[in-house]
Amino acid sequence: MAEPKGLADLKGQIVAAHGRHYLAQVDGQLIQCVTRGKKSDVAVGDLIRYKLTSPNQGVIEEILPRATLLYRSDQYKSKLLAANVTQLFIVVATEPGFTEDLVSRALVAAESAGVKAHLILNKTDLTTNLAATRKRLALYAGIGYPVHEVSAKSNPETTLATLRPLLANQSTILIGQSGMGKSSLVNLLIPDAEIAVREISAALDTGKHTTTFTRLYSMDAHSTIIDSPGFQEFGLYQLSEGMLERAFPEFGPQLGQCRFYNCHHLIEPGCGVLQALADGGIARSRHDLYRQLLHEASQKLY
């Protein structure tokens, strides 16, 4: 018997996720989607093929090939952040202070996913710790990561002038700890963001309050922003040793220069990375992070 009209396979993009409940956007309309069984391997930004089960509900049949995938993981499981993004904005602030471990791990995740990373220093109007914050960020600028200074609340016009050209024709995910002013940036860049959040919250209604979820906003036909809830930890247990050494750009010139072809860059004699560390070409904190991530990768249980 022929399949009823309207239940054919359709394509959409995931714009919000909460648990195993997803919203797909199709021609400006939101469709509630679920996965088959207990699968939860869908990320915001994914392009999907789905089948309608009612006028505004569907089942995800297929995730279309991804250009990129950002995710974090601990010993036991992975947490998908976003798919098909082209760049990552790490939002930090002069006050409250940010955690360098989170920033460094996010940069490693971006490198391993092939996603360009930018650092956005917000709240530059709060000058008490501005000089110290700039000094902390100089490490990353020296490696080659762009640092952009803005103040979403006190200087919105300049903030827009700084960020809009960077966001044009890109799919950008914003991450950051709570308190960095990420929501202020999103509301400035997407004037209807709060309305969109209420609409998405209602559509994602699962019988309980949905207060934090990752969501995608369209700036225009070619530019999107993905906002993620603030988090304090960024596990990278999924990265292999080879992926890790390539995710530190400052290691690059030294790779292949070690005495031993299987050098771990930890204690081996004749190691180019360790020599660069001793000469000051690689920061001690960055090598300590590499060492820690290497240890974590060896503890993976899944």
Image (spheres, rainbow, N blue to C red):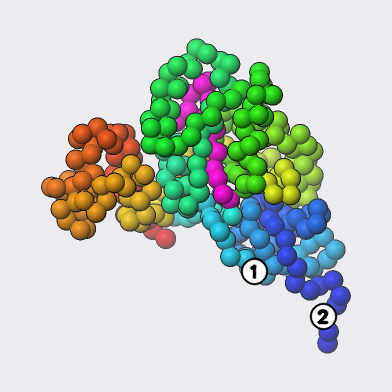
* Residue for point 43% across, 28% down: 137
Q: Is residue 205 above or below residue 142?
A: below
Q: Residues within 10 Å of mark 2 (few under 14, many from 20)?
A: few
Q: Position of residue 11 (x, y in %)?
A: 73, 65
Question: Which residue matches tag 2?
Answer: 3
Circle 1: residue type: Glu
Q: Is residue 250 above or below residue 257?
A: above
Name the image quarter holding the C terminus: bottom left
Would you say residue 102 sits in the magenta stretch? Answer: no
Say which residue appears at 38% left-offset and 36% top-offset: 143
Residue type for callout 2: Glu
Locate residue 198: give its quadrant.
top right
Secondary structure of the residue carrying tag 1 is: strand
Residue 285, position as x, y percentages in the image: 31, 34
Which residue is labeled 1 in the image?
A: 62
Q: Which residue ends up furthest to the top in the rendered image? A: 128
Image position, residue 56 (x, y; %): 82, 60
Residue visible at 47% across and 16% down in the picture:
129
Report the number of discs.
Answer: 2
Earlier sequence position, callout 1 versus callout 2: 2
CA gap, disc 1 to disc 2? 19 Å
Element under label 2?
Answer: loop
Nearer-the-camera pick, 7 or 189 = 189
Q: Residues in magenta? A: 85-99
- Asked if disc 1 and disc 2 are in contact, CB closer than 8 Å, the reply is no
Residue at 50% over, 49% down: 115
Residue occupying the far bottom of the picture = 1
Q: The N terminus is located in which quarter? A: bottom right
Q: Is 184 on the left-hand or right-hand side of 76?
A: right
